[in-house]
Amino acid sequence: MDFEVSRQDLATTRSVAVAPRALAEGEARIEVDVFGFSTNNITYAVFGDMLRYWEFFPAGAPEEGDDTAWGRVPVWGFGSVVEARSSEVAVGERLFGYYPMGSELIITPGRAGDRTVTDMSPHRATLPSAYNSFQRCSGDPIYAEDREELQMLLYPLFFTSFVIDDFLVDHDDFGSAQVIISSASAKTSIGEAFLAHERSMRVVGLTSPGNVAFTESLGVYDQVLTYDQVDAVDQVPSAYIDVSGNADVLRAVHTRLGSLLGHSMIVGGTHWDHEAAPADGDLPGPTPEFLFAPTQIAKRTQEWGPDGLSAKVAESWNRFTTWVPTWIELTQVSGVEAVEAVYRLMLSGVVDPKVGFICSLETKDLER
């Protein structure tokens, strides 16, 4: 079973029953057991064409008379090898990685080591390698069975948070005295706030009125403001991390800080359906730049080596996951209809920020 969405209208979805095809020599079949779902996955869909996310898992063809371009939203989760015509993986092996919203994924395993195996399928050859690598649970330094839910839901987001913070550190915070983060209740934002707070950087969170109390309760923001309170942001050298994708908030921050804004980073689009007011002249301050995480990952891999990067991330992740259970609430969801309901809830943007969804398209008991 595959869950697909219209690339032109994310609210249009379909479920497609797909008959398993025979494996070619060198391929392996992975059963997608379970995956996390959050606003991060909506961001993948919003930027699906711009950043080529739709290309990782090509969708089925439109039905006759239907010109819809369908896409399969990427998710992070765990899968089990159920069939293999490759010596690089073993039947029964459990892998963490980037999967489609579907029941299975066929890969061409290659570049295999004790920790990872890479999907060498031809259609992924020009796509960012960071998304093509699957972690072997047996050799993954961050894996722990009792933290699987946190790993699939938060680790990809936290890894992005780590890259955001590392990018800032790598540039001496662009001379900033504070970091301002929009969509402050989003999990990627919380991860960056946690890391910046750890190194004693002043952190300002921007959020909607309904999320102020939760965001303040986390204890990693020095100041929490609503989106209509940007004029209360201290006018000191700052870096802006745009997780919301709300162009009006972006303009308000730039207008408030102007030349005091050392860097403006675009990370996500949690406010994907927000239409900005008409622009009035050029945007004050620096030109916003999209953070493409694989670029910074490649830089640090070259400088620190793969093991060095893994060790640094693992150290931060262990501290983060010691803290996370103090505020997160995990909810298990299974079955196509229930997963679709979660997708639509996330698409609406009306979701309790402390809730994390653990999903499977197959109806099953997800309690471990």
Image: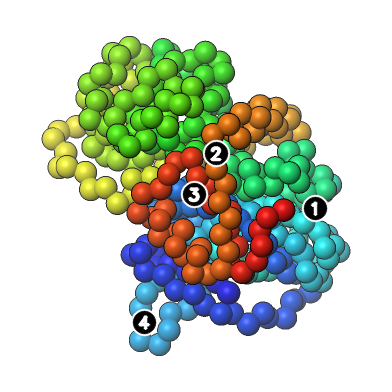
Using the image, determine if residue 170 lies above or below residue 290.
above
For marks 3 and 2 on the same chain, the one whose residue lies earlier in the sequence? 3
Q: Which residue is mark 2?
A: 328
**Location of the N terminus (image quadrant):** bottom right
Identify the residue shown where x is 49% and y is 74%.
15
Type of amino acid at the residue the image marks with label 2 = Ile
Separation of residues labelled 1 and 4 (CA atoms): 41 Å
Instruction: Using residue 207 as the reference point, say whether residue 56 is left or right of it.
Output: right
Residue position for label 4: 66
Mark number, residue 112: 1
Secondary structure of the residue carrying numbered label 2: loop
| Residue 128 image position (x, y, % from top left) | 58, 49
| Tag 3–tag 2 contact (CB < 8 Å) | no
Relative image position of residue 105 (x, y in whole percent): 65, 67
Q: Label 1 near label 2: C-beta < 8 Å?
A: no
Residue where numbered disc 3 is placed: 38
Disc 1 marks a residue whose amino acid type is Ala
Tell me which amino acid carries mark 4.
Answer: Asp
Q: Point out the tag, 3 or 1, that comes first from the N-terminus.
A: 3
Q: Mark 4 against mark 3, which lies toward the viewer? A: 3
Query: Along the polypeptide, which appears first: circle 1 or circle 4?
Result: 4
* CB within 8 Å, label 4 to label 3: no
357 in relation to 192, above or below: below
Residue type marked 3? Ser
CA distance for labels 2 and 1: 35 Å
User: Disc 4, disc 2: CB below 8 Å?
Assistant: no
- The mark nearer the N terminus, 2 or 1, is 1
Task: Look at the numbered disc 3 and give the secondary structure of its residue.
Answer: loop
> Cα distance, mark 3 to mark 1?
30 Å
Q: Which comes before the other along the chain, label 4 or label 2?
A: 4
- Element under disc 4: loop
